[in-house]
Image (cartoon, rainbow, N blue to C red):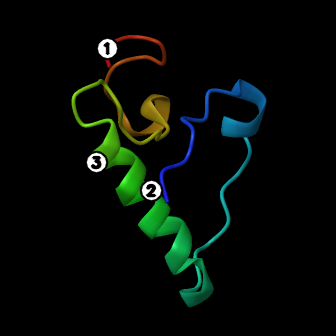
Amino acid sequence: MIQPIMKDVIFLTQKAEPVTPEDKHVAMDLLDTLKAHEGECVGMVYPTRILGGMPPGEGC
């Protein structure tokens, strides 16, 4: 199911929890949502300050 793009900074800064087999529906929703927005700049959030790369807010 296509979900709205999450932009809530407070929600997005929360620590993630490990996935479980019960989370498969979340992964499927993510794939559906990414496919629905493939013509736009949409991606997954990751800690750029730790992994290196562009600072938050720069790029797509």
Mark in the foreground, 2 or 1:
2
In the image, 30 versus 12, the foreground residue is 30
Q: Residue furthest left?
A: 39
Q: Position of residue 47 (x, y in %)?
A: 49, 38
The amino acid type, in three-letter code, at marker 1 is Gly
In the image, 13 versus 33, the foreground residue is 33
**As drawn, 32 above or below 6:** below
Mark in the foreground, 3 or 2:
3
Task: Identify residue for label 2.
Answer: 30
Q: Are marks 3 and 2 in contact (CB under 8 Å)?
A: no
Could you tell which of marks 3 and 2 lies nearer the N-terminus? 2
Q: Position of residue 42 (x, y in %)?
A: 35, 32
Task: Identify residue for label 3.
Answer: 35
Asked if residue 10 lies left or right of residue 6, the reply is right
The Cα–Cα distance between marks 1 and 3, rounded to whole angstroms, is 20 Å
The Cα–Cα distance between marks 3 and 2, rounded to whole angstroms, is 9 Å
**Is the residue marked by circle 3 packed among few (<14), some (14-19), or many (20+) residues within 10 Å?**
few
Mark in the foreground, 1 or 3:
3
Residue at (47%, 39%) from the top-left corner? 45
Q: Position of residue 8 (x, y in %)?
A: 70, 28
The Cα–Cα distance between marks 2 and 1, rounded to whole angstroms, is 21 Å
Could you tell which of marks 2 and 1 lies nearer the N-terminus? 2
Q: Residue furthest top?
A: 58
Asked if residue 22 lies left or right of residue 55, the reply is right
Residue at (55%, 67%) from the top-left corner? 26
Could you tell which of marks 1 and 3 lies nearer the N-terminus? 3
**Is the residue marked by circle 2 packed among few (<14), some (14-19), or many (20+) residues within 10 Å?**
some
Task: Identify residue for label 1.
Answer: 59
**Quarter of the view holding residue 48:** top left
